[in-house]
Amino acid sequence: MPLRNYPNWGLLVMLELFLISAIKIAFVVGVALGAMPFVVLFERKLLGWIQVRPGPNRVGPWGLLQCIVDGIKLFFKEEIIPDQADKPLYLLAPALVVIPAFLVLAIIPFGPTVHVLGRDINMSVTDLNIGILFFFAIASLGVYGIVIAGWSSNNKYSLLGAMRSSAQMLSYEISLGLSVVGVLLLAGTFDLRTIAEQQAGGFWHWYIFQQPLGFVLFLAAGFAETNRLPFDLPEAETELTGGYHTEYSSMKFAMFFISEYINIMTMSAIVTTLYLGGWTAPIEHGLLPPWLAGPLWFGAKVFVLIFFFILIRGTWPRLRYDQLMAFGWKIVLPLALANIILTACLVALDSPWWVFCLAGLAVIFVIDRIVTMLRRSTLRAA
Amino acid sequence: MGNVVFAIIFYALVVMVLVSAVAAAFLRNIVMAAFALFFTLLGMAGFYVLLGADFLAITQVVVYVGGILILLLFGVLLTHRSIETLELETRGTYVLGIFGGLLVYGVLHYFLFSVSWPTPLMKPLEPTTAAIGQLLLSKYLLPFEVSSVTLLIALIGAAYLVRRRDT
Amino acid sequence: MLQAYFPVFLLLLFGVGFAVFTMLLSHFIGKKKPTPVKLSPYECGIKPIGTARIQFFVKFYLIALLFLLFDMETIFILIWAVAFHDKSIQVFALIEMVVFITILLVGYAYVWRKGALKWR
């Protein structure tokens, strides 16, 4: 019988565990879903300014209510299920995209451990000791929703978008996994809370300074993994109308939209935790109590990264598909492997942090020179 | 109280794995059949978590659900007749299937009951990642390197696949 | 340790609930006036020709295959990276990983040369 294998917690322990988890989940999901309309609005405003137009400005002051109104509108929209669609799979696909997006929120540490009512409460939904691996595992599940959505719609644009998107996500997942190894070599753990704590005590402890190459590679792979410009080929509007969610309407479309933005937020949060010190302050100040300063710093860093995501979207051209695949397989992947060997050698030699920094920057510089030279020679040949 | 909750989760997983495995075997739409395996393999990862094998659970999800099943799904989408139901069920395939199934079960049954399982049942479950890493670098060094050679052979096979198409 | 996975399970339940609830709600709120044209696949106003369920480019299968192989290598490298922190085995572990990655690179170079990474 499996009964005796499991911890026999009493009713009170169970109730406490349930209550604490429920409160944390409510907070994290509430923040993610609550911030999402404003991230969307911020993106549209910023893109508007980059393109010298005002952006949304009709609903509410400064267009503040625009995205909330859009959300309500989507609820009342007509639900269309194409009659040639494979109905069970067609209905399952949005759920398969949104559930992994929520699940990843569980492992993000957004604050230190605080002491409440005689208990030590970690400011994160949970701390898995396989933390970052959990992120990779769940992120790899996101591919299913996209493939299933594209196939079940019975629409050519959807299927093309789905195949493109899935091949892209698969390719960059490897780069994502390999580029993080540098940080793991330094940290010696998968646990995201421990990784964040190791970077406490000032911004010069952040892993971005020891892993400049890893940071750039991880960020590039992260952009591709979340299907953002310049890697947004699956939904390149000019080629594929809407990509894999062309045939989706009403709340089913909203699910794809919500998960896309939650994925951007979690990706920013993971980058923050791995490379930018997580919730720890850039300079020790002690002005605010830690339970308040932690989440504030964390939010600020995530916001800066989201701002960066949008800036890139507003200013970079889209890659061609063959360029995209070549970038992932022929540039990011070998560089990530080089970064692993380089970092491992430096860790074995007990190098100070600035050696890591200089070595990483040197590699970036050399690669940049080589790529520029190659491009010039191909241009001259053409 | 706690063990009852876990037992409920365990049996829910059992139902999920069994139902989806049967569905994978009997659904006539092969895309649906391939997709049913998604729940079977995820359920297996759930068992690993309940057994305290966290790294194994993650590997199950990354390799089987995120890799092999995707490959299977792509393969199904590549075939001409993915939407048509395949008429494979003749008496011969049934007999062959039942015979093969019994054979696999027999082998599993033999090993299940001939091996003694040294499980310290009442110990609290501990994280496994560090221990696995240590073992890979010491006791299981040879399998570790041999696995890389195996993967190399597989890579060469994949490249061969492209070459065949070009000629 | 199971304690840490309980919130993940709760969040999973929440995600399923969220998906089912919102889809059902919009199903009941939204108006429905289906017409044959509305329910046909969208192709920018042109009548769709044939089915979308065509045989697919074999290249995607190859990408999935390569992904699977590199994915397993990644798992090995990740677990090695965490064990690497132990000072006593560091040099040994480094040599071991250099061997591992070199073998991987041989396969990678072969795949590159055979044009499997080229997208046409």
Image (cartoon, coloured by chain):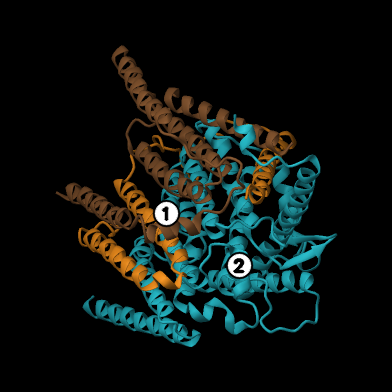
Q: Give the camera-side residue of A111 and A245.
A: A111
Three-letter residue code for mark 1: Leu
Residue at x 74%, y 51% (from the top left corner): A21
Name the residue carrying label 1. A170
Residue A242 position in % (x across, y down): 52, 51
Name the residue carrying label 2. A194
Q: Is disc 1 placed on a helix, strand or loop?
A: helix
Residue at x 42%, y 25% (from the top left corner): B25
**Chain drawn brown, letter?**
B
Residue at x 64%, y 32% (from the top left corner): A3
Q: Quadrant of residue A48?
A: bottom right
Residue A365: numbered disc: none
How packed mark 1 is, by other alpha carbons closer than 10 Å (few <14, some 14-19, many 20 or more), is many
Q: Give the camera-side residue of B156 and A76.
A: B156
**Chain drawn cyan, letter?**
A
Residue A375 visible here: yes
**Chain drawn orange, letter?**
C
Three-letter residue code for mark 2: Thr
Q: Is disc 2 placed on a helix, strand or loop?
A: helix
Q: Is residue A371 left or right of residue A35?
A: left
Q: Are dots 1 and 2 in contact, CB under 8 Å?
A: no
Q: Alpha carbon of mark 1 to alpha carbon of mark 2: how far?
A: 28 Å
Q: Quadrant of residue C31?
A: top right
- Which image quarter is the C terminus of chain A in? bottom left
| Number of dots carrying numbers | 2
Dot 1 or dot 2, earlier in sequence: 1
